[in-house]
Image (tube, rainbow, N blue to C red):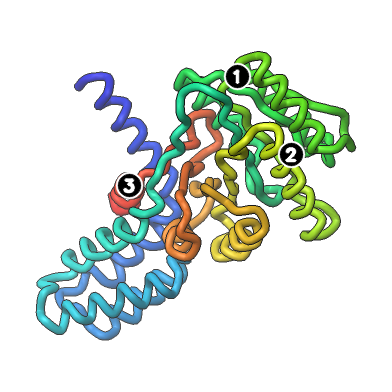
Amino acid sequence: MNAENTNKNGIFGKLKEGLAKTRRGLVHNMDEMIFGEKVISRDSFETLEELLIMADLGPAFTYDLIDAIKEKAGRQELANPESLRNMLKEKMIAALAASDTPLDIPPGGLYAVMVVGVNGTGKTTTIGKMAGTLKGQGHDVMLVAADTFRAAAIEQLDIWSRRVDVPMIRHQMGSDPSAVVFDAIHAARARRNNVMIVDTAGRLHTKANLMDELKKIKRIMERELPGAPHETLLVLDATTGQNAIPQARMFHEAIGITGIVLTKLDGTAKGGIVVRIAQEMQLPIRYIGIGEGMDDLKRFDSRNFVTALFA
């Protein structure tokens, strides 16, 4: 086996391991409660519907799938429960396909990534891991500590900048976040960095305050670097399940999200939220987090995700 295949197998194995809780909550339960039957009964449909909803795949996907299954069963096109299993896999892959778009950073110039999300989603950790990944791909990365409302956020980002050995621009706690971004853009140009990743606050006194602050940062970026932010990434915590949806809508309506990172998939039995987010938000899922290690932030691949879930 060559090194490339070994690496691919390693990535797949890690993904499979990270989705273990969702597999137990969805796939194993289906295997035990449905696919052991010799015929697909009305009770099977009801059980499947319940499992899909509990896994947070969302009502739209669930009801569409159940209707499609009933139609095929009525035409006797589902010869056995295994056919149903395969149909579920293909439906999930199809539902995720539109969100299966990796982050593509063009060569030359300065590419600005603004990362947003509420506190506790793993936003700063995601930024650190992204920086390590992009540096490994040959990019010159700079981190920007624009969450100036929490000293811990600045210190955490500083730890990551040292860990992955990339520069960081910071001001004192309580400084204007937009001023940090202003300085960072000019510093990145002077140092010829080609990627800057901006950490932002996840909580102010009110949602309106938070969104106003993010809009201000975005205006400064657009003014100082035309076209910026080139990517506005929203970090969501998969363990919150369907509660991630209103968060996504709130940020998207306020500042316009271009991509999503879904973290902590290894800590939830409701990994089906990936499907619901993909269908309801119609946005690319750039990365998924499946562990605490440096290499546990993975580029989202819909077919690999579903295959690992059912493996």
Q: Are marks 2 and 3 in contact (CB under 8 Å)?
A: no
Q: Position of residue 131 (x, y in %)?
A: 57, 27
Q: Is residue 297 left or right of residue 187?
A: left
Tell me the residue at 45%/53% (across/down).
21
Residue to which mark 2 is pinned: 220
Estimate how packed mark 2 is, as few (under 14), some (14 to 19) or many (20 or more) residues with alpha carbons within 10 Å.
some
Tell me the residue at 48%/20% (across/down).
136
Specify the label residue 28 is tagged with. Answer: none
Query: What amino acid type is highlighted by mark number 1?
Result: Asn
Estimate how packed mark 3 is, as few (under 14), some (14 to 19) or many (20 or more) residues with alpha carbons within 10 Å.
some
Residue to which mark 1 is pinned: 193
Query: What amino acid type is highlighted by mark number 2?
Result: Ile
Q: Is residue 40 left or right of residue 268?
A: left
Q: Closer to the camera, 19 or 94?
A: 94
Q: Position of residue 197 (x, y in %)?
A: 63, 32
The residues bearing labels 2 and 1 have C-alpha atoms spaced at a distance of: 19 Å
Q: Position of residue 193 (x, y in %)?
A: 60, 19
Kindly report which numbered mark, 2 or 1, lies closer to the viewer in this rendering. 2
Q: Quadrant of residue 6?
A: top left
Residue to which mark 3 is pinned: 308
Q: Closer to the camera, 23 or 243?
A: 243
Mark 1 lies on a secondary structure that is: loop
Q: Position of residue 194 (x, y in %)?
A: 56, 22
Can residue 14 be seen? yes
